[in-house]
Image (cartoon, rainbow, N blue to C red):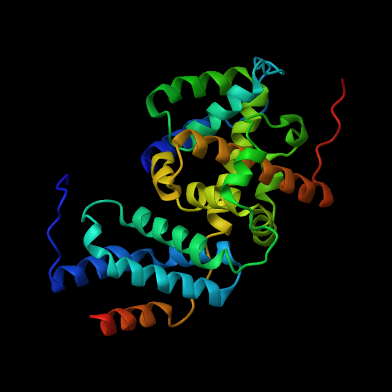
Amino acid sequence: MSEVQRRKYSQEERSAVFDGEFMPHIDSMYNFAFRLTFDEDDAKDLVQDTYMKAFRFINSFEQGTNAKAWLFRILKNSFINDYRKKSKKPAMVDYQEVETFYNSDDVDYQSTSDLRAESVRDMLGDEISNALNGLAVDFRTVIILADLEGFTYEEMAKILDIPIGTVRSRLHRARHLLKDTLKSYAQSMGYGRDEEED
Amino acid sequence: MAGTKRRIKRLAMENNDAPSPERKLQCSDVSKCFQLLERILDGELVEEGKEMLQEKLDRCQPCFEHFHLEQAIREVLKTKCTKQPLPDKLAESIRQMIQDAR
């Protein structure tokens, strides 16, 4: 586990790691890529590039460690380095900018307090998906990693190269922004909570 | 991890009844409580989380509602946002690229 200079994989081992540990994650990888780029061709290229890099740097992957997290980290870095630069989409805000802009943990809980679990469950896939896609990329990313893919805070910290505390606060804020959008959907569908008598 | 999340879910389902008269209607520290509940739902705070969760679900209506809302959101995200169909030949073309690179 802790050897600094790991021996190189043989040809057969490389194939075994690639097919056995990398390829099974292709659906999750594509879903992530698509939700970052919103474009099928870009997502395809991003996934292909990621797998090429994974193959090229396979010796720095330690068998038995978390292949999915390792692959997601490569994909996220490729996205930042290769795709984000050429994108003109307004949602593509810089990670750092977002953090400085929203540097507080405080959110306005009152604004989403009348959103109910039942109305969320009644929403269509498209509505949920659109709400997620409407988030700035940094917020979208943490929700994808945590809720769609089930990564732990520690894994997310490694994938995103940020401290765990930042993962936690970014996720909390992302969820709040998502609820804000869901609430406006719920209201437009007439799911608003009846005024309570007091 | 997954086992913990299932246990928490079961715990929450057992408590998924109508608002209890014993729950207080105002939460004294919404910000702290809600962040805590979210961490528990995320599978962090495994051991210390269980008791706190039970306490909050039993005693505090805003915490109870927030917990169930957060849980519903996680469920719909997981079931409705992970089905992006993989393009037909993507896996095949990746395998081919790797073959060629060898």
Horizontal side, residue A72 vs residue B39: left or right = left
Corner quadrant of residue A75? bottom left
Estimate the x, y position of residue A60 in percent, counting from the top left: 24, 58
Does residue B99 appear left or right of residue A175 in this picture? left
Where residue A72 appears, as percent x and y from the top left, is: 41, 57
Q: Position of residue B51 (x, y in %)?
A: 45, 20
When the figure is inspected, residue B58 is found, relative to residue A161, above or below; the finding is: above
- Asked if residue A96 is positioned above or below residue B36 in the image, the reply reads below
Measured as percent of width and height from the top left, residue B90 is found at: 43, 79
Q: Is residue B81 above or below residue A158?
A: below
Residue nearest the viewer, comparing A89 with A51: A89
Q: Nearer the viewer, residue B17 or A150?
A: A150
Foreground of the two, B90 or A116: B90
Of B40 and A87, which appears nearest the observer? A87
Any part of residue A32 in sight: no
From what the image shows, is residue A180 above or below residue A25?
Answer: above
Q: Report if residue A120 is visible in the image.
A: yes
Q: Residue at x 52, y 32 (%)?
A: B12
Q: Residue at x 56, y 20 (%)?
A: B56
Number of residue marks: 0
Q: Which image quarter is the C terminus of chain A in?
A: top right
Residue located at (67% from left, 40% from top)? A101
Residue drawn at point x = 42 percent, y = 50 percent:
A159
Left or right: residue A70 versus residue A145 is left
